[in-house]
Amino acid sequence: MLFMKNDIIIVGGGASALMLAALLPKNRAIVLESNTKLAAKVHISGGGKCNITNMQMGTAYYLGDASFVKPVLKQFDEKSLLQWLERQGLSVEVRKKSQYFCKNSAKDLVNLLSHASKHQTIKCNEKVIEVTKKEGIFSVQTESQTYRASKVVVASGGLSFPLLGASGIGYEIAKTFGHTIVNTAPALVGFTVQKEQFFFKTLSGLSTDVTITVEKERCTGAMLFTHKGLSGPAVLDASLYWKKGKITIDFLGDFSLKAVEGSKKQISSLLPLPKRLTKAFLVELGLKDKAYRDFTQEERAILGTLNAYTFAPAGTFGYTKAEVTKGGVETSEVDAQTMMSKKEEGLYFLGEVLDVTGRLGGYNFQWAFSSAYCCAKAIKKGKE
């Protein structure tokens, strides 16, 4: 059994864990990562470029308790994050109008975080099995040995990308100390479809802009048809809010059928959709491809359903394809100023393991970094 000179054990070696390690004073922490290398998910995020944060920031972009999310983001917002990264030498660029990416590659961010946290003890290939506490001291059991410290920070992420070492250890630790776990599910993930929408699969590779409404939330962007169902930014965002039941997709947007009611052109040439998609819908809706002026009122009404095409997905692509896990540690049981458990002194939770999940666009990395900052600030000030 090792009682380290470090008095803080950080479970996990991803974005939030390394940010915390970077911000803490020298030799205060030991980082225990189950993988052979640090920040495996950061390496592959954003197509290898890593979408770090977004200039459009706020609680509206998160699924979670706004009263918990807001003070965390306020302590360390996107401007503060970008300034810190710039001081560390990271070059960023804006893409898609508001999203900040690594200018070169995600590897630059991983290298930056690894370098910034090197004043702590970093141990890879250390899979945590359980955490217990006795007489004010935590014991962290790994597959190889036991570590002891006065504080434990759970920054182990969620269940997404199990091939990269994701596990539910963070939730197990939380439950050990009496925390409630809000039901977890894959998020920022594609939808599978039921047999009524199997024709979508024949359109694999096709993309079109849509607005998806789910649980009173509107998600606008590209939708991609795949051999498994539906994907693309709008779908991934919609998956954040979907539980079960129907979603509604507006395929036509601002396009007005009334504006073309006298047109002699065939409808497949009029609709603002890829012609292949329009023809597939015509077959599915039982309509012929003809001039819109020749459509009966009943046929026009049927075609108008493309403004609100409603169906129930069969499910999602699952954790192997999900970018994040929604649900997690109940935030009412965690102090938003310090990230410390309200149930166990010296136990902290950061990032994805909490019941806070952001949309696509850098929001989840911002959450990881902001929560780490709050924790580091509290520990340094002794507000534990």
Image (cartoon, rainbow, N blue to C red):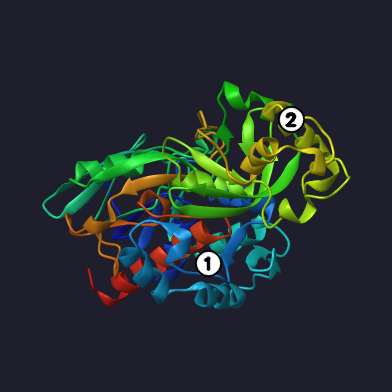
Residue 1 seen in the current view: no
- Residue 318 at what x, y percent from top left? 51, 32
**In this rendering, which labeled residue sits more in front, label 1 or label 2?**
2
The amino acid beneath tag 1 is: Ala
Check the picture and name the quadrant holding the N terminus: top left
- Residue 344 at what x, y percent from top left? 17, 55
Asked which quadrant contains residue 343, the reply is bottom left
- Mark number displayed over residue 116: 1
Using residue 384 as the reference point, say whether residue 211 is left or right of it. Answer: right
- Mark number displayed over residue 310: none
Q: Secondary structure at mark 2?
A: loop
- Residue 78 at what x, y percent from top left? 52, 72
- Depth check, front residue: 339 or 11: 339
Please, which residue is most extreme toward the right here? 264
- Depth check, front residue: 5 or 295: 295
- Which residue is found at the position 22% from the left and 50% from the top? 138
- Which residue is found at the position 61% from the left and 27% from the top? 197
- Which residue is found at the position 63% from the left and 57% from the top? 50
Q: In this rendering, is residue 36 above or below 345?
A: above
The amino acid beneath tag 2 is: Leu
- Depth check, front residue: 252 or 108: 252
- Mark number displayed over residue 287: 2
- Which residue is found at the position 43% from the left and 70% from the top? 23
Crowding at label 2, few (<14), some or many (≥20) Cα neighbours within 10 Å?
Answer: some
Precedes in sequence: disc 1 or disc 2: 1
Residues at marks 1 and 2, CA–CA distance in whole angstroms: 62 Å
